[in-house]
Amino acid sequence: MIRSELIQKIAEENPELSPREAEKIVATVFEEITAALARGDRVELRGFGAFSVKHREGRIGRNPRTGAQVVVEEKAVPFFKTGKLLRDRLNERQA
């Protein structure tokens, strides 16, 4: 599902919301998750999962094309851990 499909689904399931209002809701949720992660906070959506930030140390990498050594800077990367309810629902489909 892509963002536009999510907006459309929310608007369809909530007839009191216009598609523009649904779009604003989705944008706000994503902006708040992004802002919290940028502050280094953890975002937990019960039954779905938790977003957090992991830090990767700097290292010496290798350019695959030339084989030359390259310095890879330290960086922060987003990390998502699924919640138990989500994992259970995914696994019940396979059973």
Image (tube, helix red, strand yellow):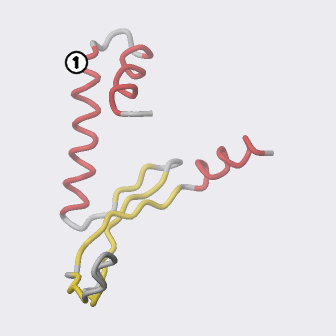
Badge 1 element: helix
**Residue farthest right in this picture:** 95
User: Which residue is the site of mark 1?
Assistant: 20
Left or right, residue 52 beside residue 82: left
The residue lying at 39 percent from left, 25 percent from top is 5
**Residue 55 against residue 45 in the figure, above or below:** below
Residue 44 position, x and y percent, is 40, 55
Residue 43 position, x and y percent, is 35, 57
In this rendered view, identify the residue nearer to me: 10 or 69: 69
- Quadrant in which the N terminus appears: top left
Q: How crowded is mark 1: few (under 14 residues within 10 Å), some or many (20 or more)?
A: few
Residue 57 position, x and y percent, is 28, 85
Dividing the picture into quarters, in which one does residue 93 lie? Answer: top right
**Residue 36 against residue 76 in the figure, above or below:** above
The residue lying at 21 percent from left, 45 percent from top is 31
In this rendered view, identify the residue nearer to me: 29 or 72: 72
**Residue 51 against residue 66 in the figure, above or below:** above
Dividing the picture into quarters, in which one does residue 54 lie? Answer: bottom left
Left or right, residue 89 beside residue 38: right
Left or right, residue 47 beside residue 8: right
**Residue 44 against residue 71 in the figure, above or below:** above
- Please name the amino acid that badge 1 sits on: Arg
In this rendered view, identify the residue nearer to me: 13 or 62: 62
The residue lying at 28 percent from left, 16 percent from top is 19
**Residue farthest top in this picture:** 15
Left or right, residue 54 beside residue 48: left
